[in-house]
Image (cartoon, coloured by chain):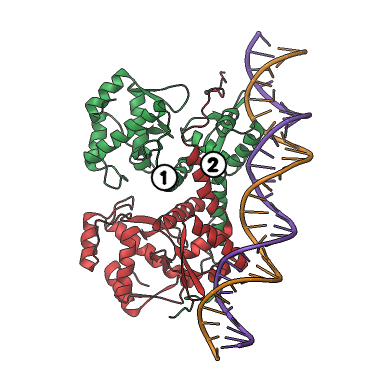
Chain colours: A green, B red, C orange, D purple
Amino acid sequence: MASRPLIKPTNSIKNDSGSELENSIAALATVMSDVSRVKMLCALMDGRAWTATELSVVADIASSTASAHLSRLLNENFIICVAQGRHRYYRLKGIETAELLEVLMGASWKQVEPFTNKTPIALRKARTCYDHLAGEIAVNIYEFMLINKWIDIEGQSLTVQGKQQFEKLGIALDEKTTRKKCSACLDWSERKYHLGGYAGAALFTHFERKGWISRVNGFREVLVTYQGEKALKRLFNIVV
Amino acid sequence: MASRPLIKPTNSIKNDSGSELENSIAALATVMSDVSRVKMLCALMDGRAWTATELSVVADIASSTASAHLSRLLNENFIICVAQGRHRYYRLKGIETAELLEVLMGASWKQVEPFTNKTPIALRKARTCYDHLAGEIAVNIYEFMLINKWIDIEGQSLTVQGKQQFEKLGIALDEKTTRKKCSACLDWSERKYHLGGYAGAALFTHFERKGWISRVNGFREVLVTYQGEKALKRLFNIVV
DNA sequence: ACGACATTTCGATCATGGACGAAGTAATCC
DNA sequence: GGATTACTTCGTCCATGATCGAAATGTCGT
């Protein structure tokens, strides 16, 4: 049996063009390779601004350590900082970071099996995921949309009908947004998909404006109002 | 001006359900956080099997070091190993790794500016990217497809016309594949998109079978045959 | 102005893991 | 069979960076 290597090592392929790129990939991954940083970034995924101390608590580290991580994330353009009095509020700089984190979450999940749901019940029902809705309700809405063909099978774009339905709801969709219009975002607690991307954010804003949901506690938890329950039943046939 | 933190640190949110998940995200990122490993994975992106020595050359490290990296990648299920005589061939285990790497590449690029193209000319023209075609020609094909509406604007799925055109070319598309049917894959050298996903792979296979292209050198480089040039001109109006 | 709180800076410690070369195992070539 | 090649294992070295506590800086509340 032949066992000649397909490629001769002597034939130099090192110092390929990708050299900088590979460094830059590794650098990017290094930022995500520390559990404390990931914890902080995950907290920031709710789209809010958090103080340094709050983030040190979620990551379970000393505030000085958190500070070091934060200044690093700041340098590498993952987050921005707004000083307000004696607090410094940190938030995600762009949607890209959130999207990258989502991808990594998705890839990680496939490894973490079997699946036991340890999410607190309050959060499991409804919560924010960066700037859109997550949790059981969000997953149900997503599946309603899939069944009724508001979104295509890949979950990457709204269908024509979908757009019409959004209009009917009174949600204006700006066609010129540079952001991904619609995405299937993996849900932490349910491990199914919910609606992300621009459409997800628009829907969330609409829910808030209508008074159908309200954020509690300053956390990710979201409560459905009485009006909201009625609307969910009427629009998506969901019983909360 | 109010400067009360939105969230009280005392209110415990640590030990959230995500704890394992965050660990697992960090672990995943750690694998990608080493330049040598990234270099090896990038080499493996061409879909071929590489020997340990070859990979140590691309990564520019001692073979013993490469061996350590490879056994780690093996443990973490990124690659598989086939022993054949005194060689051990390594290849990517699944499409997921390749896809993850593509995402990281895409995210990294936005940081590496300004853009100077240092890709060797041979590779810039045409090469493989995992299991589909990349390089200038691939980018041109992709743009032809976009203009002629073979694929939707997000580049995530083939249009009805697109599918018809594939059929007309004699490329059978299996609807039942679990793989992403079609994706806009960022091109290293051109920094534009080319066709990836299942459709990209199918097109590449078809090109090979028709004798329009041939892989050279055992590397990523791909040459266009005389028949291929005629086909490219005829089908996509591309002059090589 | 003073004390309490929020945050960063500094210095020191320590664990991780990436690097190499030398030695060991195993298959191939002549 | 003996030399060569491919690859892994082992031991050691060393740089990085995550961590903490203490001290410094800055802001708020009263």
Residue at 31 percent of width and 51 percent of height: B153
Label 2, residues with CA under 10 Å away: few <14, some 14-19, many ≥20: some
Place of residue C15 in the rendered image (x, y in percent of width and height, measured from the top left): 66, 46
Q: Nearer the viewer, residue B15 or B177?
A: B15
Residue at 32 percent of width and 22 percent of height: A210
**Nearer-N-terminus badge (2/1):** 2
Q: Is residue B235 visible?
A: yes
| Residue under label 2 | A78
Q: Chain of mark 1?
A: A
Which quadrant holds the N terminus of chain B? top right
**Left or right: A172 in relation to A32:** left
Q: Is residue B76 above or below residue A47?
A: below
Place of residue A130 in the rendered image (x, y in percent of width and height, measured from the top left): 44, 35
- Count of numbered circles in the view: 2
Q: Nearer the viewer, residue B200 or A109?
A: A109
Q: Amino acid at mark 2?
A: Phe
| Residue under label 1 | A113
Toward which corner of the image does residue B180 lie, by quadrant? bottom left
Q: Is residue B112 visible?
A: no
Toward which corner of the image does residue A170 lie, by quadrant? top left
Q: Chain of mark 2?
A: A
Residue at 53 percent of width and 25 percent of height: B12
Q: Amino acid at mark 1?
A: Glu
Q: Nearer the viewer, residue B107 or A26?
A: A26
Q: Is residue D5 above or below residue B161?
A: below
Toward which corner of the image does residue A75 lie, by quadrant? top right
> Which element type, helix, strand or loop, lies under badge 2?
loop
Same chain for mark 2 and mark 1? The answer is: yes
